[in-house]
Amino acid sequence: MGVVQAVLGCGRWGSFHLWYGSRVGNRMIGWEPGDAPGFRRLLEERRNEHLRLPPDVTLTTDLGACLRADIVTVTVPAQHWRALARHLSGADLSGSDLVLCMKGMEKETGFRLSQIAAQEGLAPRSLTAWLGPGHPQQFLDGVPSCMLLASESDEATSRLAGIMGSGLIRFYRSRDLVGCEVGAAAKNVVGIAAGLLDGLGKSGLKGALMARAPQEVARLAARLGGDWRSIYGLSHLGDYEATLFSPLSRNRLFGERMAAGSAWSGELAEGVDTSEALLATARRMGLDMPITAMVRAIIDGVIRPDEAISVLFSRPEKEEFPDDFSAG
């Protein structure tokens, strides 16, 4: 009967997963609360601003109907994950692979998304993070990309890559869940910084941003128990083109608009809340994250964007590769 895959959250990214899962031959079911405006449109018209759902995709407001799936894919915003995980805490997920397709850290606690799953008592067959570069609009246009499956279970990522890989998305695999989650969350903050540079007419400084940002993120990943080398892979540096340069990047656009003084809540820019979580975590560990601190100070209105950039780039000169991440 084929693999049954449920998608929890049917927004822009979730609806793409429904489309893509059907494309690779899975039996797809999508869930969203019935009062979500975008989901009402999907239910009534079977489409959104980006795609039309294949006829074999099932949509439901019954969360329980999704919990017997072989693969349970979660695409809700990172800051909504704990509430959903709490709803799932009593469910038997022992026959399901849980795949988290969000990039962020909990604002209030700094916890990674896989940590939240464990804290809420979820016990799936396996837990995997789906990370890396890709915009739904480009995939729908047939533009291929390489993405990443990170899990402590090599068997799980191998099996999932076999089920979900295609000519459109080729999967790499990693056992470093900690480092990959940190890297994926932090790249959204770097995306805001890139947007600030674009908005200030200083895009030429993106080279320096790309050289320095991975170093401060790698230092944090190592201190948290991850492998610093993951930051130079698809979860972080490999996602820079899609996040720091693409006009489709919401984090980059948030930074650009902030630099121009345009009003935007940043609700869909995950880097806004993640910057707070990252900075609080770094401070608890006595680590300096100047780029993250700059982004947070601008968001909080502590400093003007143009002044912040000047301060950041007037810091004392450093060697290009001074850090020994292997020492944690």
Image (tube, rainbow, N blue to C red):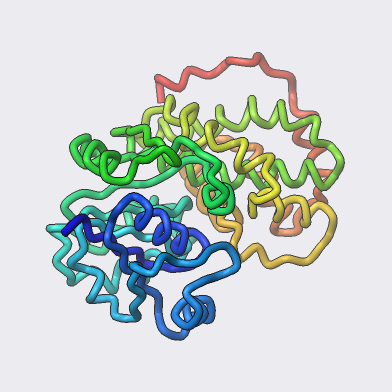
In terms of depth relative to the viewer, which is nearer, 294 or 123? Answer: 123
In terms of depth relative to the viewer, which is nearer, 188 or 17? Answer: 17
Q: Is residue 71 visible?
A: yes
Q: Is residue 51 above or below residue 260?
A: below
Side of 201 relative to 8 (left or right): right
Q: Is residue 118 visible?
A: no
Side of 61 relative to 258 (left or right): left
Q: Is residue 278 above or below residue 1?
A: above
Side of 206 relative to 277 (left or right): right
Quarter of the figure that contains the N terminus: bottom left
Q: Position of residue 326 (x, y in %)?
A: 40, 20
In terms of depth relative to the viewer, which is nearer, 278 or 227? Answer: 227
**Residue at image coords 56%, 32%:** 216
**Residue at image coords 47%, 63%:** 77
**Which image quadrant is residue 119 in?**
bottom left
In terms of depth relative to the viewer, which is nearer, 296 or 263? Answer: 263
Q: Position of residue 187 (x, y in %)?
A: 56, 41
